[in-house]
Amino acid sequence: SATGLSFFLASFQVHEKSVLMPLAPLSLLCHDLPGFVAWFSVVAAWTLWPLMQQDKLQLAYFSVLTIFQVLLHGTEWGATLAPKDAMAVWEKIGGPCQTLCTLIKVGSFAAMILLHVVQAAVPPPARLPDVYPVLWSVVGCGCLCCAWFVTTYVSVTQFRSGAASPS
């Protein structure tokens, strides 16, 4: 996943759907790192919002995210994942960075919801018609850079300790 994120973040004119490439190997770790995979899945889907709007798939977008959250938090399968810490992979960083990682998680969800609400309530200014897609790109890039840092850090520390890499 760290390699896929590196490619996605450093590529020139990458398509939005390419964010699904790092999600594919990461999703295999859903049972080991459920909180991180769930967060990354929501971020990946959220970054596709401008594309979903262009293709008139807003209802499908909200339906899939709602179903995902219901499955994650309201089913027996989700309950089996819940006892583990919601962001166990970020705990591996430890120390003061753990607080930062929690702030990033909460802040990213708040920013995603806030951008949806603001875009629905406030039309873009006439002189900045693309302000919302740009904000989506900036916030999405910040979230994906945080995910890249975490996956790279965990990969390097597990490589040094001789354990199998989770990403």
Image (cartoon, rainbow, N blue to C red):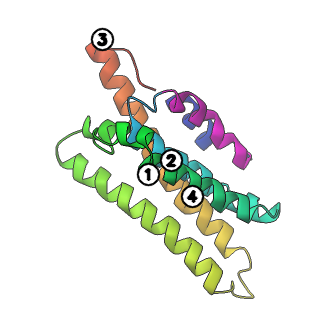
Query: On the picture, is 141 further left or further right than 92?
Result: right
Asked whether the residues under the numbered discs 3 and 1 touch, taking CB atoms below 8 Å apart as contact, a structural biologist would say: no
Residue 152, quarter of picture: top left
Q: Position of residue 42 (x, y in %)?
A: 53, 51
Q: Main secondary structure of the magenta part?
A: helix
Seen in the image, is 97 located left or right of residue 106? left
Q: Secondary structure at mark 3?
A: loop
Instruction: Estimate the spatial distance between the alpha carbons at disc 4 and disc 1, rounded to whole Å.
Output: 11 Å
Give the quarter of the image for residue 52.
bottom right
Q: Secondary structure at mark 1?
A: helix
Magenta stretch, residue numbers? 14-28
Between circles 4 and 3, the one closer to the viewer is 4
Residue 167 belongs to magenta span:
no
Residue linked to disc 3: 162
* Mark 3 to mark 1 CA distance (whole Å): 37 Å
Is 153 rendered above or below residue 162? below
Label 2 to label 1, Cα distance in Å?
Answer: 6 Å
Q: Earlier in the sequence, mark 4 or mark 3?
A: 4
Q: Position of residue 6 (x, y in %)?
A: 55, 35
Residue marked by disc 2: 71
- Labels 3, 2: front one: 2
* Category of crowding for the residue at label 2, using alpha-carbon neighbours closer than 10 angstroms: few (below 14), some (14–19), many (at least 20): some
Disc number at residue 66?
4
Identify the residue under disc 1. 74
Q: Indicate the position of residue 46 as horizontal and vertical percent values.
A: 59, 57
Mark 4: few/some/many CA within 10 Å (<14, 14-19, 20+): few
